Amino acid sequence: MNSVDQIKEILLEYKNIAFAYIFGSFVRNKMTELSDIDIAIYLYNEEISTEDYLNLKTKLEDKLKKDVDIAILNNASPLLKFEVCREGILLFSRDEILESNFKVHTLFEYEDFKKYRDMFYKNMIEKLRKEV
């Protein structure tokens, strides 16, 4: 069984997970010995207990023999959500409508956020130029 199948098998045990992605260096084929595996999950009720989170993380790390970073998409930053949508590989979805709505909302949220980020960078560059 490959790593993706192992991850999927463990995640499917958690009924609160509506859908899940793998992203980061794993999907870009840039894994090194020091790389962790990035997994993003979207929860039905937007919360996971600390105990369940640590249990899930431990199960994944024990099975994969790698550090695992789990991002909760429900409350992630617009940039992280956009990165997951752009480059992530869908592991599974229990609710395709919810997943589609998440993607649409993420794209709108990212575009709104992009305006402010661009203004911030422009102001920062101007400030740095004045200081130099």
Image (cartoon, rainbow, N blue to C red):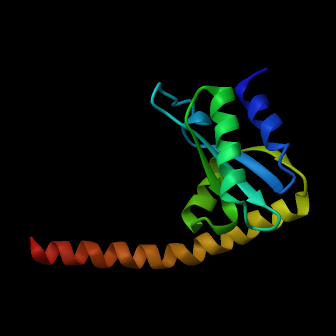
Above or below, comparing residue 115 to residue 45 in the picture: below
**Is residue 88 visible to the viewer in this orientation of the structure?**
no
**Quarter of the C terminus within the rendering:** bottom left
Question: Who is closer to the viewer here, 2 or 112?
Answer: 2
Q: Quadrant of residue 59?
A: top right
Residue drawn at the location 60% of the way across and 26% of the way down:
65
Question: Camera-side residue: 124 or 93?
Answer: 93
Is residue 43 toward the left or the right of residue 85 in the image? right
Position of residue 104 relative to residue 6, above or below, is: below
Name the residue rendered at 65%, 29% in the picture: 62
Quadrant of res 102: bottom right
Q: Residue 82: x percent and y percent?
A: 62, 60
Residue at (55% x, 63% y) in the render: 79
Query: Which residue in the rendered view is the most extreme toward the front?
Result: 51
Residue 37, percent across and down? 59, 37
User: In this rendering, would 23 be left or right of 16?
Assistant: left
Q: Nearer the viewer, residue 96 or 52?
A: 52
The residue under the point 73% across, 65% down is: 47
The x, y position of residue 61, in whole percent, is: 62, 33
Q: In the drawing, does residue 49 fall left or right of residue 124?
A: right
What percent of the width, then of the height, locates residue 30?
Answer: 51, 31
Q: Is residue 105 visible?
A: yes
Quarter placement of the N terminus: top right
* Residue sitting farthest toward the top: 1
For the image, the number of numbered tags is: 0
* Front in this rendered view, residue 81 or 111: 81
Corner quadrant of residue 66: top right
